[in-house]
Amino acid sequence: MKSICMLLVGSFFLTGCNGNEERLENYNNHAEWAEEKLIEHYWNENGKLMNNAYPYSKEREESLNYWWKAHAVDAMMDGYERTGDAAYTDRAEGIVKSIIKKNGSLFNEFYDDMEWLALSALRLYDATKSETVKGYVLKLWNDIKTAWWEDELGGMAWKKDQRDSRNACSNGPAAILAARMYEYFGDKEDLEWAKKIYDWQKKNLVDPESGLVYDGLKLEENGDLNVNKNWIFTYNQGTYIGAAVELYKHTNDKTYLADAEKTAASAMKYHTVAETGMMKEEGTGDGGLFKGIFIRYLIHLYEVNESVQIKEMIFHNADTLLSKGSTKEIGLFGPAWDMPHQEPLDISVQLSGVFLIEAAAKIERLDSE
């Protein structure tokens, strides 16, 4: 990656124009600041959950956005992992329970939404050992397994009424969840689930040359199987990488590690602007969360391979976000990490920025061990 001369903005950045790009120090402090700003702008104390957008508007809060809220739980768990502060787990548990209350049920018609909640709630259970939260996770996993089809398409459905198509967004997270269920509860059948889902996705939705993950496939009325090769979203790359890393950790099969590294290398190139080294903008709404999820699972790969390329990409994007994409006083992040935000700002977009800065802080911790 080219060294890019950065500008000094406020107290955030160290100028680096000497041919070797200098970077911010102590991402831990920046991550804590980002979490504090997330809470300041989005936390709803009355409902014990995060609002959908900043500034608050009653109209924008009419929709639950189940899966955005699930990722807000992940943000709280990132803060807890970094600090050990129980205030984070308290908020995380409040969000989980508020999702269920506002949804009217633990379950959802979208399997991927439930997968995201199960993944974040499993982290919460790991931290608190709450039997209530464990019960949520087990019930979600049992329902999620009904997404699997033994038909001509196979794989995990995206939605409960889905019949003629399958998507990466429901298979990648499900494989990660299955592997983690095995890790936490020791049921070997869950490891087999992880392998089965992963193998299906690799066979049907992953380009064998580049490792890039396609969005989905559909069985057309004429019997043709149409793979959507035009939609190559960051979060689908991330969850496939995450599933491969989980399976590598549990099996020590280096094929999984090679798969993850191939996809990571291709995805970083595909989703990065070559001239700037910045990840591309993916809009607001649901798309606002995509690259944050990608960053999350790149970190899991970094934990096992200590890739210099991953570290440099995350540090560079984090430094640029902090210097160009926000100010210390406001602390809001837009969909383009090298430009200021615009309001109203969906929490999906804000969460991606928080995930990025937490990722930089995690690399810093890992490197200091």
Image (cartoon, helix red, strand yellow):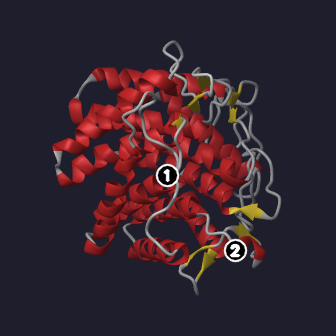
- Tag 2: amino acid: Glu
- Tag 1: amino acid: Lys
Disc 2 marks which residue? 62
Q: Nearer the viewer, residue 20 or 88?
A: 88
Disc 1 marks which residue? 160
Image coords of residue 209 (percent x, y): 51, 12
Nearer mark to the viewer, of 2 and 1: 1
Is residue 198 among the parts visible in the rendering? yes
Which element is circle 2 on? Answer: loop
Numbered-mark total = 2
Q: Which image quarter: residue 35?
A: bottom right
Q: Quadrant of the N terminus?
A: top right
289 horizontally vs 106: left or right: right
Q: Nearer the viewer, residue 9 or 351?
A: 351
154 horizontally vs 326: left or right: left
Q: Which image quarter: residue 45?
A: bottom right
Other residues around mark 1 within 10 Å, as few (<14) / some (14–19) / many (≥20): few
Q: Quadrant of the C terminus?
A: top left
| Vertical comparison of 144 with 128: above or below | above
